[in-house]
Image: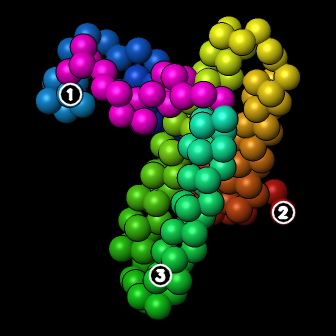
Amino acid sequence: MTVTAVIFDVGGVLAHPSAGQFPEDFFGSQAADGDHPWHRLERGELTLAQAYWGAGFLLTIVVVGLSRLLGVWLDRANLAPTPLGLVLLGHLTFLSVLVIWQIVGIWRAAGNHIRSTGRRTWAVLARVAIFAGALRGFVDFNEYGIATGGDGGAG
């Protein structure tokens, strides 16, 4: 049996966790959902502009820059395969969580924008853009062999 994909849904972003699945001190109280920007985007409470240009575009620029710095450091660190693999796995896990958070938040902000203003144009364009970006990310993962175990896809 070959596993080609694993989905981590820690805390129930994609599916609702069953009651008692995690102790309350693991994520904090579910009743106390704070006003932190992370939570506000996740709930779609930021404006569409804040969600798309702030959490989507600008944060992606920052993360790409930090990823490049990580790459430079990894080139110089000359790590053995196991530590290198762990660093890369941790980085890919972080990127995956971040991208899912961005997609969910922008999608929800677009829906809230339509409901609150009645205007659809920018909300639909934002949803099309994040769908296209997610599709491109999936293709890139497959092309570079990350999701397929390193064989580089069909090429």
Mark 3–mark 2 distance (CA, rounded to whole Å): 26 Å
Mark 1–mark 2 distance (CA, rounded to whole Å): 46 Å
The one nearer the camera, 142 or 12, is: 12
Closer mark to the observer between disc 3 and disc 2: 3
Label 3 sits on residue: 74
Is-magenta flag for residue 43? yes
Closer mark to the observer between disc 3 and disc 1: 1
Q: Is residue 125 above or below residue 65?
A: above
The quadrant of the picture occupied by the C terminus is: bottom right
Label 1 sits on residue: 28
Q: Which residues are magenta?
A: 29-48
The one nearer the camera, 66 or 143, is: 66
Residue 21 appears left or right of 149: left
Q: Is residue 128 above or below residue 151?
A: above
Q: Amino acid at mark 2?
A: Gly
Query: Could you tell me which residue is drawn at 48 percent across and 43 percent down?
Result: 97
Residue 15 appears left or right of 112: left
CB under 8 Å between discs 3 and 2: no
CB under 8 Å between discs 1 and 2: no
Q: Position of residue 8 (x, y in %)?
A: 44, 36
Label 2 sits on residue: 155
Q: Amino acid at mark 1?
A: Gly
Mark 3–mark 1 distance (CA, rounded to whole Å): 34 Å
